[in-house]
Image (spheres, grey):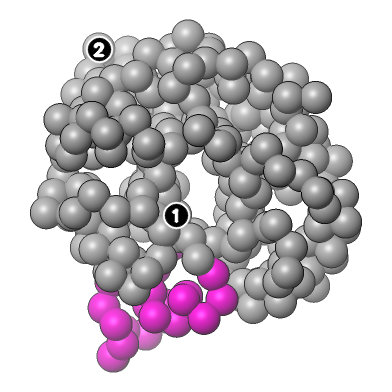
Amino acid sequence: MKPMMAANWKMNKTAKEAADFIKALKRKVKGVKGVDILICPPFTALQAASKEAKDSIISIGAQDLFWEKEGAYTGQISSKMLKEFCSYVIIGHSERRKYFAETDETVNKKISSALSAGLKVILCVGETAEERASGRAKEVVERQLRRGLEGIQAGKMIIAYEPVWAISSGDPNHKSATPADAQEMHSFIRQKLSQIYSIEHAKKTRLLYGGSMKPENVKELMRQPDIDGGLVGGASLDTGSFLKLIGFKG
Ligand code: PGA
């Protein structure tokens, strides 16, 4: 499966900073074939980012959406609005679950809305440190998958496993999951997808790892059979380090 390196910029970069980054990056990745590149800037930078990424191999995604098509929902952005500027959307990131009351039920509505608008979805799942310590990591991930995907037809979906305890929150020295722990959960996720959908669908679904992926650990993580790419926060904010992730094979 062709790997993907996806940048989740979170609440970082203005429209101008995003455009400057993509301008620099697209020159460097011209001709890159072995990996898909996705950048998810904040809403306010989507237009500038998509303009700059046009006619390059870089795809653009959003970090969230609201499930209604339009209406009196102050501050919200719909899938129809995103469709003008991007082709992907991240749904259910742990920071949205933690700070903005995202639940498996709202995640489910968002996935349904995004897919019906023709957006490709990156569904994030992952357990907290406490859930892992109490031996419930797999149970939590399975619940997030089953409830998040309830009633959703097998579609253009990517799953990102992001153990909450491994997310850097901007700290460059934060520890990632070990490649073995990440692989174990990825293999579990693929198994669950084959139960929810089919073995064929599970086999061709990309599974991204997220949580302190950086130039120092990318090779070992990407060597795992069920890790098909990364969803990267901190290490994607600088062109130099993001390029190293894109070139993980080299
Ligand atoms: P990180 O964030 O790479 O900074 O750990 C990943 C994410 O939260 O998507």
Residue picked out by circle 1: 90
Q: Which mark is residue 135?
A: 2
The residue furthest left is 151
Q: Nearer the viewer, residue 195 or 217?
A: 195
Under 8 Å from ligand 1: the CB of mark 1? yes
Q: Are marks 1 and 2 in contact (CB under 8 Å)?
A: no
Residue at left 48%, top 17%?
225
Instruction: Look at the image and give the residue range highlighted in magenta.
Output: 64-86
- For the residues carrying marks 1 and 2, which lies nearer the camera in this image? 1
Q: Would you place residue 27 above or below residue 98 in this image?
A: below
Q: Amino acid at mark 2?
A: Gly
* Residue 49 position by quadrant: bottom right
The secondary structure making up most of the magenta span is loop
Q: Would you place residue 161 above or below residue 104 in this image?
A: above
* Alpha carbon separation for disc pair 1 and 2: 27 Å
Residue at left 73%, top 69%?
55
